[in-house]
Image (cartoon, helix red, strand yellow):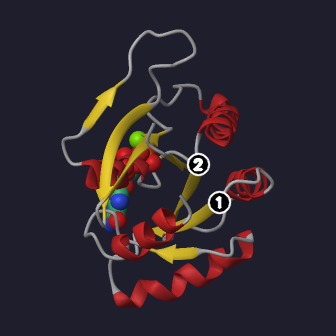
Amino acid sequence: ELPLIAVCGRPNVGKSTLFNRLTGSRRSIVGDEPGITRDRIYGEIEWAGRDARIVDTGGVIPDDEALIPSEIFRQAQVALEEADSIVMVVDGRTELASPDRELARLLLRGGKPVFLAVNKMDTQELLAGAENFRRLGFRNVLPISAEHGSGIGDLLDEVFASL
Ligand code: GDP
Ligand code: MG
C-alpha cells in the first residue's frame, strides 16, 4: 500500500488548487464504502521516482459558516489517523486566524510529520509575509504558490523525505 499525504486547512486557502497541481488527472472521488466519506478526494502523485497517495480533506464545505471550524477539525482528526504525512495550508495573504492556530495545535500534537505550506506567495515581494506564519510553531515552513507552481518542488522534497 502506498503512503498517504493529507492536505488540511481552512476553506479558500488553496488546498484543491495544490491537490490538482500535484495530481494532474490522477484523481478520484472515492465512493460509498463504509468509513470512507465522499468529502475526501484522493489522488496519486509521483515525485523523484516514488509514488504516494494524496487526499484533499476539504472536498465539501458545509453551507453553514458555524459548522466550518468543526468540519475542519473533524477532517484533521481523520488525517491524523490515516495519513503518514500532513501538509497544512494557510493563505499567506491573510492575517493569522484563530482557526489556523487551533488546527496547527491539533496537527502538531498528532505525532505525524507535519509541514506548513504558506500559499499564494506568487511574487518575491510577498515572500516576507510567510515569516509571520512561523509563529504557528511548525519546524517546516514552506512558501508556495499553488497557482504558479513556485515552491512546490521544495515542499515535495521535504514531504517525501518524511515518508
Ligand atoms: P480550498 O478551499 O482550500 O480548496 O481553496 P481553492 O483551491 O479552492 O482556492 C481558493 C481560491 O484561492 C481560488 O480562487 C484559487 O484560485 C485561489 N488560489 C489558490 N492558490 C493560489 C495561489 O497560489 N495564488 C493565488 N493568488 N491564488 C490562489
Ligand atoms: Mg477545496
Instruction: State left or right for residue 96 relative to residue 121.
Output: right
Q: Is residue 46 above or below residue 147?
A: above
Q: Image quarter for residue 132?
A: bottom right
Q: Residue at x 76, y 54 (%)?
A: 111
14 or 96: which is nearer to us?
A: 14
Label 1 sits on residue = 113
Residue 61 locus on image (x, y percent): 50, 31
* Circle on res. 6: none
16 or 125: which is nearer to us?
A: 16
Quadrant including the N terminus: top left
In terms of image quarters, where does ligand 2 lie? top left
Q: Residue at x 35, y 49 (%)?
A: 19
Q: Residue at x 54, y 79 (%)?
A: 130
Marks 1 & 2, CB-CB < 8 Å contact: yes
Q: Extreme left residue here?
A: 25
Residue 11 locus on image (x, y percent): 50, 45
Q: State the SS at label 1.
A: loop
Label 1 crowd bin: few (<14), some (14–19), many (20+), radius 10 Å? some
163 or 136: which is nearer to us?
A: 163
Label 2 sits on residue = 84
> Identity of the amino acid at label 2?
Asp
Instruction: State left or right for residue 129 relative to residue 23.
Output: right
Label 2 crowd bin: few (<14), some (14–19), many (20+), radius 10 Å? many
